[in-house]
């Protein structure tokens, strides 16, 4: 059994990077992964298919593509991307987010 994890201030864990994030893994177990990531302005995550995921923006501005939709990102925004959807993120300013991925990894077929 895993123990509780308390993070009093996410700012102490986030690493801002570009062109791609260098996430801090907070929890990683079968079918459930939580990470904290930061992007420098101009950095991003290329569009790719992924399992069900929830992205909560902690600070900054940018945009996120999920399939054919584009969302403006700002602190407090949350995006829920369905399993198999293609998604990517572009940072306009320093951007920090918490991501929760749920379910099995996608295989080659999606």
Image (cartoon, helix red, strand yellow):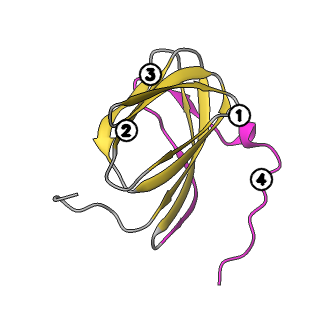
Q: Which residue is mark 4?
A: 7
- For the residues labelled 1 and 3, the Cα–Cα distance comes to 20 Å
Q: Nearer the viewer, residue 54 or 71?
A: 71
Counting residues from the start of the chain, the first of labels 3 and 4 encountered is 4
Q: Which residue is mark 1?
A: 76
Counting residues from the start of the chain, the first of labels 2 and 4 encountered is 4
Q: Quadrant of the C terminus?
A: bottom left
Q: Which residues are magenta?
A: 1-29
Q: Nearer the viewer, residue 15 or 103?
A: 103
Report crowding for label 3: few under 14, some 14 to 19, many 20 or more residues within 10 A (C-alpha): many
Q: Position of residue 43 (x, y in %)?
A: 44, 22
Q: Which residue is mark 3?
A: 43
Q: Position of residue 8 (x, y in %)?
A: 83, 49
- For the residues labelled 2 and 4, the Cα–Cα distance comes to 27 Å
Q: Quadrant of residue 98?
A: top right
Q: Nearer the viewer, mark 3 or mark 2?
A: 2
Residue at 33% across, 37% down: 67
Q: Residue 95: say if magenta.
A: no
**Disc 3 + disc 4, Cβ < 8 Å:** no
Q: Nearer the viewer, mark 2 or mark 4?
A: 2
- Mark 3 falls on what kind of element? loop
Q: Position of residue 54 (x, y in %)?
A: 54, 49
Q: Outermost residue, bottom direction?
A: 1
- For the residues labelled 1 and 2, the Cα–Cα distance comes to 19 Å
- For the residues labelled 3 and 4, the Cα–Cα distance comes to 25 Å
Q: Which residue is mark 2?
A: 87
């Amino acid at each position: 059994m895993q123990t509780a994890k308390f993070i009093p201030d996410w700012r102490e864990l986030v690493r801002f990077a570009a062109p791609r994030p260098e996430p801090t893994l907070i929890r990683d177990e079968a079918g459930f992964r939580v990470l904290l990531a930061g992007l420098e302005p101009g950095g991003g995550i290329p569009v790719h298919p992924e399992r069900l995921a929830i992205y909560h923006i902690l600070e900054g501005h940018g945009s996120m593509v999920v399939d054919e939709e584009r969302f403006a990102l700002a602190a407090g925004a949350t995006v829920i991307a369905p399993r198999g959807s293609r998604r990517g993120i572009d940072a306009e300013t320093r951007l920090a987010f918490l991501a929760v991925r749920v379910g099995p990894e996608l295989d080659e077929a999606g």
